[in-house]
């Protein structure tokens, strides 16, 4: 009789040892199952976070692209209107979305192969633009000379152009590391358990 046969025979003969061995095996299998379930939950959360971030960055990037289209023509119009009415305050709608990023900043590290630095820069630039837009309605903006007001708008457009470029880089990086169905053009791939 080999070692395992002898061991198993002794285990079965001794009820206490048998019960302990079975209890240990049940415990070990339960722990393995719990670890696997936790891994699946983390993976699903990371994929959901990636999709939500992708959608948010994509929205902001497209919005910035629309804002910066025809930049030179719009700057000429702003300059002409400010010359005609120096007290005029340009209206800029700030429709940035940062909810997914702000609520999940602690989990960015959970997204495998994603460098969070460009995301932090992107959202930092959005925040900077938000402050610039708020500044348009402050008394300090109204006190600026005409060319100073135009320069503020130019800086806003330059910042928007740079942020849009950064957003496109992030989207391209995300597409490389995510499943093929990441964009809204195709439905998301189901997660198989």
Image (cartoon, rainbow, N blue to C red):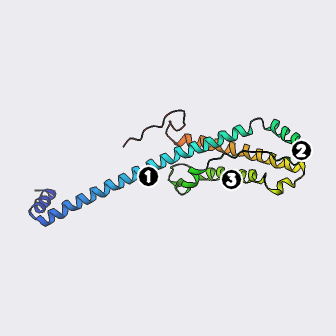
Mark 2 is surrounded, within 10 Å at the Cα level, by few (under 14), some (14 to 19) or many (20 or more) other residues, namely few
Identity of the residue drawn at 19% across and 62% down: 21
Question: How far apart are the alpha carbons under marks 2 and 3?
Answer: 29 Å
In the rendered view, would you say 24 is above or below 132? below
Q: Residue 103 placed where, x, y %?
A: 55, 55
| Circles 2, 1 touching at the beta carbon (< 8 Å) | no
Q: Residue 81 placed where, x, y %?
A: 87, 41
Query: Could you say which is closer to the camera, residue 54 or residue 166?
Result: 54
Q: Quadrant of the N terminus?
A: bottom left
In the picture provided, is 143 more to the left or to the right than 30? right
Residue 8 shows in the view: yes
Which residue is under mark 1? 42
In the picture provided, is 6 more to the left or to the right than 128? left
Disc 1 is placed on an element classified as: helix
Query: Which numbered disc covers residue 127?
Result: 3
Residue furthest to the bottom: 16
Which residue is under mark 2? 85
Q: Of marks 2 and 3, which one's residue comes earlier in the chain? A: 2
Say which of marks 2 and 3 sits in front: 2
């Amino acid at each position: 009789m080999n070692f395992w046969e002898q061991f198993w025979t002794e285990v079965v003969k001794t009820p206490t040892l048998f019960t302990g061995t079975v209890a240990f095996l049940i415990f070990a299998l339960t722990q393995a199952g719990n670890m696997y379930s936790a891994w699946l939950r983390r993976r699903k959360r990371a994929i959901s976070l990636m999709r939500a971030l992708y959608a948010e960055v994509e929205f902001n990037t497209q919005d910035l692209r629309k804002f910066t289209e025809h930049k030179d023509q719009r700057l000429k119009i702003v300059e002409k209107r400010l010359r005609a009415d120096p007290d005029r305050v340009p209206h800029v709608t700030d429709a940035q979305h940062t909810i997914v990023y702000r609520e999940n900043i602690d989990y960015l590290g959970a997204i495998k192969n994603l460098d969070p630095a460009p995301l932090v820069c992107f959202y930092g630039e959005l925040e900077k633009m938000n402050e610039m837009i708020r500044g348009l309605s402050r008394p300090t903006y109204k006190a600026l000379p005409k060319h100073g007001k135009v320069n503020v708008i130019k800086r806003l457009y330059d910042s928007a152009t740079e942020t849009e470029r950064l957003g496109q880089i992030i989207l391209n990086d995300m597409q490389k590391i995510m499943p093929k169905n990441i964009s809204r053009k195709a439905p998301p791939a189901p997660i198989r358990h």
